Image (cartoon, rainbow, N blue to C red):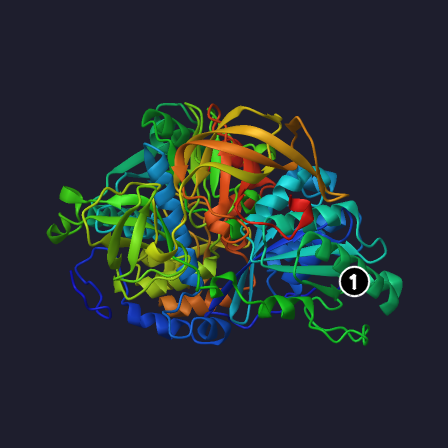
Amino acid sequence: MTAILSTAVAEPTTRITSLLRLATAGSVDDGKSTLVGRLLHDSKNVLADQLDALERLSAERGLDGADLALLTDGLRSEREQGITIDVAYRYFSTGSRAFILADCPGHVQYTRNTVTGASTADAILVLVDVRKGVLDQTRRHLAVASLLRVPHVVVAVNKIDLVDFDEATYLRVVDQVAELAAALGIERAITVPTSALAGDNVVERSARTPWYDGPALLELLEQLPPAEAVLDEALRFGVQSVIRPQSAAVEPQYREYRGYAGRVDAGVVRPGDEVVVLPSGVRTRIAAVDTPGGELAEATTGRSVTVRLTDDIDVTRGDVIAAAVDAPTPVHEAEAMLCWLAGVPLRGGQRVLLKHGSATVQAIVTELHGRLDLDELKLHAASAFDLNDIGRVSLRLARPLPLEDYRLSRSGGAFVLIDPVSGGTLAAGMARDPGRTTSIEWEI
Amino acid sequence: MSEDRSGARTEASVGARPESTVSTIATTGLETAAHEGRSTFDQLDHLESEAIHIIREVVGELERPVILFSGGKDSVVMLHLAAKAFWPGTVPFPVMHVDTGHNFEEVLAFRDRTVERLGVRLVIASVQDYIDDGRLAERADGTRNPLQTQPLLDAISANRFDAVFGGARRDEEKARAKERVVSLRDAFGAWDPRNQRPELWSIYNPRHRPGEHVRVFPLSNWTELDVWRYVEREGIELPPLYYAHEREVFARDGMWLAVTPHSQPRAGEEVVTRQVRYRTVGDASCTGAVLSDATTTADVIVEVASTTVTERGATRADDRISEAAMEDRKKEGYF
């Protein structure tokens, strides 16, 4: 590797207005770590001492230049084995946008990390080696992106330099990607021809791909609309804590204060809104939206605030305050897709804890309907789910929860399963409304 | 309570900002268009809300939380966020300082003042006590950061703390980049990077077996620049040594070290007076100052935005020992 690196200083970026959470996923040796390194380096987000360390490490390994892939390998065993084991989080910014990058390992046995990274992502970046095209791992990564409903899917068709920047080879991979995306129910997968090693179409558009008139990868990422732009959803406010300071009030005037601290998980909350508290079903109105800086006229999705209600009713941690006009119905039973993330297999009848928002209830996995075969994209009967299996189950809950269809609401449908003894996280779950039909065959 | 949106509630003890200043922070592009007619919610708002959500969630799930508070800027910001999370109540749990005994006087004074102002209880775990009674031996190089682990773990056990909030950020260091927001520690306080829980959506799982505890990092997704921009926006007070001042220093290992009772020049190390500030605050014997003219928060933001060296690379001798220095310390139970 002979890339020439520099430590040119970025324009001081002191004002950043938007945030994009990006997850990367790639297969072994398709150059993902190099691409991430290239994004960080070429956007001037690698500092001099990091670069020094990189060059020193590269030299110790007998490489003839700095290996950008080493930028993202944080743990000793990763550097020793030359592989990435765990999700690494990276931070960079360009112009007015900040990025949180969850760099997920490509090895098939580490699918749980891709699920982890994708769960919070506004966009997922999947790498494909242009010489190899779509592989089993690509299929798995895109299936996870679809299952987790990542809003934007970007495919970097990498190592384009190794096919002499040949358009026809690129287009063959583009067709494969489009076919797979359609089969998975992904509305749009944007492809970009890149060479992470040489830098083509990563930060700057390349002159060596004159047949490609789209944006460079970073340009594209800068333009993707952030998820919070969707504000027309119905209000969901998860109550985390009841604030009743009494003698511990910061000022005597707040001794009688009673508010519900939490986060706007969907929609917008405003004083005067008619709401219903779930699961009790009691109706009331929002009296005020408080912050230490003053009352707000509204709080949008993602904001942590404290609300007061007009009526003195029983509200506790784990309750959901929802728009009265469009409130979910709390359920005792639900179907769900599960990504099983534990080393011990799941079997029918297993007792678990289920955490949804801030509510944790006892639950039983009553039935395993089938395990997803990622090659055929079909469910096959299975008596157990092993680590990294994805499948469909039925659950029974000890207390009703306002679960929503994950495909319509990420925050309303997402939950985790927890081992009641060790406290370990067992599975990522996505609730499915049995009353709704699906257009996507493989999800049946 | 005041119904006036634009007026800051000045009686609140948390350094609050009036909502009306938000519009001066968000200035351009997509977000303004997407949120037309709505209050803006910029990147710092995201980070603040995420951190408050994390703090409330862990406090809601566990019994005996504590915040690590050194007087360093990250711990100051974290305590500020905790105060906002439970306003208008006070912070409902204590703070703990793992005191190396190698402090800058002005940081200790700042620590005590802040604890007093917020009305929180301070627990001190003292490295000096351990050295005095022989439980720990002073290291040959005289630095004490690595000695903090045992007093920290003992204090966690003695107080039965089950959630320990730390101000660590993933952008600080490679091993930290791989750590979860809520990170399990076994009965020995050890971190097992090969066996971390998956952390999905923003559903945090701090459950653990008796004897184990979790470390919680609400600032995981913040960068050094984010911290400074937030300090400016919220008007948060920091110890004065974060701003440029004249100080007697000497050069060692490519860093400027202050002349203090804990760090004295060796033969051949010339003492000079320089205009410096600190980017991190820790053990005075191994924390370096940087040459700087930044006397205000706004100056610091410009300086940090254009720096070419990371915070730890510039100022922490103890992280230079090996490529995996931090990873090794974390596995043993360090912050």
| Relative vertical location of residue A234 with respect to residue B215 in this rendering, above or below | below
Q: Is residue A68 left or right of residue B280?
A: right
| Relative vertical location of residue A267 with respect to residue A383 in this rendering, above or below | below
Q: Is residue B111 left or right of residue B171?
A: left
Q: Pointer 1 indicates a residue of which chain?
A: A
> Looking at the rendering, which quadrant does residue B241 occupy?
bottom left
* Residue A207 seen in the figure: yes
Residue B222 % position (x, y): 46, 55
Element class at badge 1: helix
Q: Which residue is mark 1?
A: A174
Name the residue nearer the viewer: A236 or A341.
Answer: A236
Residue positioned 62% across, 40% down in the render: A112
| Relative vertical location of residue B202 with respect to residue A51 in this rendering, above or below | above
Residue A306 % position (x, y): 28, 53
Residue B260 % position (x, y): 37, 48
Please count the marks in the image: 1
Residue B213 % position (x, y): 42, 30
* Residue A2 seen in the figure: no
Residue positioned 69% across, 31% down in the render: A381
Rate crowding at label 1 as few (under 14), some (14 to 19) or many (20 or more) other CA atoms within 10 Å.
many
> Looking at the rendering, which quadrant does residue A296 occupy?
bottom left
In the image, what residue type sits under mark 1?
Answer: Val
Residue positioned 81% across, 75% down in the render: A211
Name the residue nearer the viewer: A33 or A21.
Answer: A21
